[in-house]
Image: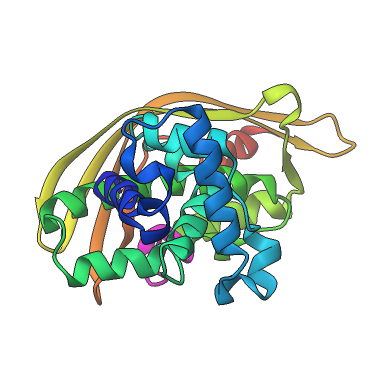
Amino acid sequence: MKSIYNLIKAEIREHSVVKNSILGNINPWKRSHYIILSEIIKDELSKKEELQNERKFELGTSISHITLQRFFENDYDYKTHNDLRFLKTLDKICIFLGFKSLNAFVTKIKDEDLYSESVFAKEFTTDIVYKYCQTNFEFFKFFPVSKIEVFDELIFPEAPFIERIRNYSSELCDRNLKLYTKNNRSNFEIFDLDVISEESDKIVVKTQEFWNLVFTVENSGEEYLVNELNTQIYFIKKINNAWKIWDNYNPNSGLVNNEIAKKP
């Protein structure tokens, strides 16, 4: 994703409307220039067919100058730049650039070989892991409803990993557990992420993760805690030209289920 991130920056500077404005002859840009860029993008997005339907309400038609300045000036960060809100910002930028979405932009640069396949695979798969962790946390927030479909874009439907998630989550939901998030009681952090093995259709990623989760049973006083720092391994495969998670090794998988089983 880092390669894509940098290509998007370059594409913005090369956009005809930007090049033909006062911004075309200025480098580097400062705060006032990002205000101008924000207005240019807002004006162009208001004309885009892609934002004349429900996507207009989903994405909006503007990007603040503060967001744009951070986008250009800050180094790429896996966690920050895979946040759902930021991905929506990238969608809007890509629509401004003339594409239907971020995915359409990615497809174009793949087709035109504008990056190293090996570098892209590593970046993309590590992004998948960050997205998975964030999605997993959101998944817990839906409890006691098990919305397993939130993983559709990240885990292959036939993968053993999704079956394990389905099994342990259904037990927790059946017991009416809810994730307690008040005052940030529940949270997670990824401290390290490394690609430890790479093949043409498989990449193995190792992470150091800290999960601090508090599950409660409403109106019962029952509380179950997960407070673990551990190493996890993700096995990511390329099937039918799509990279997704196939399996995961987590030594503390099912920890809450085990704690429940110990109770009389």
Quadrant of the rendered image containing residue 64: top right
Quadrant of the rendered image containing residue 51: bottom right
Colour scheme of the rendered structure: rainbow
Percent position (x, y) of residue 18?
Answer: 40, 52
Res 234 seen here? no
Residue in view at x 66 percent, y 66 percent: 56
For the record, the magenta segment spans 152-162
Q: Does residue 39 show up magenta in the picture?
A: no
Q: Does residue 160 show up magenta in the picture?
A: yes
Quadrant of the rendered image containing residue 130: top left
Res 121 seen here? yes
Residue in view at x 49 percent, y 37 percent: 34
Quadrant of the drawing holding the C terminus: top right
Residue in view at x 63 percent, y 65 percent: 46
- Whether 155 is drawn above or below 70: the answer is below
119 left or right, relative to 69:
left
Percent position (x, y) of residue 111?
Answer: 19, 72
Residue situated in front as seen by the camera: 101 or 93: 93
Percent position (x, y) of residue 67?
Answer: 53, 37
- Whether 1 is drawn above or below 188: the answer is below
Percent position (x, y) of residue 106?
Answer: 31, 63
- Whether 224 is drawn above or below 50: the answer is above
Residue in view at x 20 percent, y 53 percent: 120
Residue situated in front as seen by the camera: 106 or 251: 106
Q: How many marks?
A: 0
Magenta stretch, main secondary structure class: loop
